[in-house]
Image (cartoon, rainbow, N blue to C red):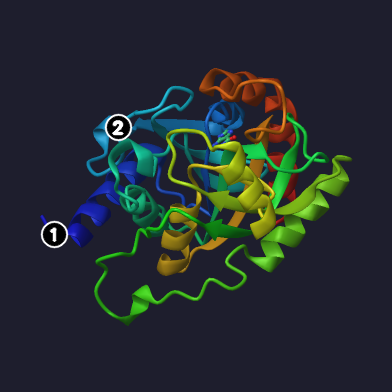
C-alpha cells in the first residue's frame, strides 16, 4: 500500500469510529499530561496499536490512544502520547499521525511538552507559551524528503493569531502566562550544567526532548501551530534537586489542573 492510501485508510477507520465530524484542531500531549483526555466530551478512543504507522507506547507517562471528541465546542483529535527521537533515532516518527490529523480536516495543532526551565520566573508547575524554538538536535524530520517543499519557512511557525488566543485565554483565567523559546535537544540523557549555561546564552527559556520535529512537520503539511511547555523542573545545575523522569511525571500531575484549565481557556478563544 502506498503512503497516501495508508493515510486515507487510517482517516477512514477513525471517521467510522468517531462519526466522521471534521476535526478542527489536534492536540499532542506531553509526558504526564494525558489526563486532559478525560475532559473530552463524546470521546471516542482509538488505540495507536490499531493504527498502522502510529508510534508504539515507548515512554511511561504517555497514553497511546488517539481520542476524538469535543472540548469547549472545538472538535479535537487528541494524541495521548507521542514518539520521541531518542526512542529510535527517527525524527519523523510523528509524520503519519500528523498526516492523518490533516486528513481528518484539522487546520491546526497544539503541541505540549513537559520541560525544564531556564528562568527563575518559570518555576516547576508553571506553563510557558512557546513563541519560538531552537532546534539543537542536529537533525530534522524532513531529511530525505524530496522536492522543494522541504525548504519550509519557519518564521512565525507558532501562529501569531493562535498565540494571541492563548494569551487571551490565560488572561481570562488569571494565569500570568509568560512567552518563551523552547530548545530541543535529542536526549535521552538530561543536560549537563554547562549545556544549560550554553542554552541560556543562546536564548532558550525551556528545554526538552520533543515537540520541535512535530512543529517542523506541521508547518511542512500546512498546519498552524501553537505550543505550551509545562515546567516540571529547573534545568540542570539550577537547583539542588536531581532531575529524573519520575519528577517530570510528579510535577506534570501536580500542575495538571492549571495546565488543563489553560488549554480549555485557549480553545474558548480560538
Ligand atoms: N531537560 C530535558 N527534558 C526535560 C526536562 C529537562 O530538564 N524536564 C522535562 N523534560
| Left or right of 204 on screen, residue 215 | left
Residue 264 drawn above or below residue 245:
below
Residue occupying the point 40% across, 31% down: 65
Residue behind mark 1 = 2
Residue behind mark 2 = 56
Residue 203 shows in the view: no
Using a 10 Å C-alpha cutoff, classify the residue at mark 1 as few (fewer than 14 neighbours), some (14 to 19) or many (20 or more).
Answer: few
Q: Position of residue 15 (x, y in %)?
A: 35, 46
Q: Are marks 1 and 2 in contact (CB under 8 Å)?
A: no
Q: Position of residue 4 (x, y in %)?
A: 22, 61
Nearer to the camera, 54 or 239: 239
Q: Position of residue 169 (x, y in %)?
A: 79, 48
Nearer to the camera, 245 or 79: 245
Q: Quadrant of the N terminus?
A: bottom left
Element marked by disc 2: loop
Q: Position of residue 184 (x, y in %)?
A: 52, 50
| Left or right of 189 on screen, residue 252 | right
Q: Quadrant of the C terminus?
A: bottom right
Residue 42 shows in the view: yes
Q: Where in the image, quadrant-wise, is ligand 1 located?
A: top right
Element marked by disc 1: loop
Residue occupying the point 45% across, 33% down: 189
Amino acid at each position: 500500500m502506498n503512503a497516501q492510501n495508508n493515510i486515507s485508510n487510517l482517516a477512514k477507520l477513525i471517521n467510522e469510529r468517531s462519526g466522521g465530524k471534521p476535526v478542527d484542531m489536534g492536540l499532542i500531549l506531553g509526558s504526564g499530561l494525558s489526563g486532559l483526555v478525560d475532559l473530552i466530551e463524546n470521546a471516542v478512543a482509538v488505540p495507536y496499536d490499531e493504527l498502522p504507522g502510529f508510534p508504539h507506547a515507548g515512554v511511561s507517562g504517555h497514553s497511546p490512544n488517539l481520542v476524538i471528541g469535543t472540548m469547549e465546542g472545538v472538535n479535537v483529535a487528541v494524541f495521548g502520547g507521542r514518539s520521541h527521537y531518542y526512542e529510535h533515532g527517527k525524527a519523523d516518527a510523528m509524520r503519519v499521525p500528523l498526516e492523518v490529523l490533516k486528513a481528518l480536516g484539522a487546520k491546526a495543532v497544539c503541541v505540549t511538552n513537559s520541560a525544564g526551565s531556564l528562568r527563575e520566573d518559570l518555576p516547576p508547575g508553571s506553563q510557558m507559551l512557546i513563541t519560538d524554538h531552537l532546534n539543537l538536535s542536529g537533525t530534522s524530520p524532513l531529511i530525505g524528503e524530496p522536492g522543494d517543499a522541504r525548504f519550509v519557512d519557519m518564521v512565525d511557525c507558532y501562529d501569531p493569531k493562535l498565540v494571541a488566543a492563548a494569551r487571551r485565554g490565560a488572561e481570562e483565567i488569571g494565569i500570568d502566562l509568560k512567552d518563551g523559546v523552547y530548545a530541543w535537544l535529542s536526549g535521552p540523557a538530561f543536560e549537563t550544567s554547562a549545556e544549560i549555561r550554553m542554552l541560556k546564552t543562546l536564548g532558550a527559556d525551556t528545554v526538552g526532548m520533543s515537540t520541535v520535529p512535530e512543529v517542523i512537520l506541521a508547518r511542512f503539511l500546512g498546519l498552524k501551530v501553537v505550543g505550551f511547555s509545562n515546567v516540571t523542573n529547573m534545568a540542570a545545575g539550577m537547583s539542588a534537586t536531581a532531575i529524573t523522569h519520575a519528577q517530570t511525571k510528579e510535577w506534570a500531575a501536580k500542575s495538571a489542573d492549571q495546565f488543563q484549565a489553560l488549554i480549555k481557556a485557549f480553545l474558548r478563544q480560538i
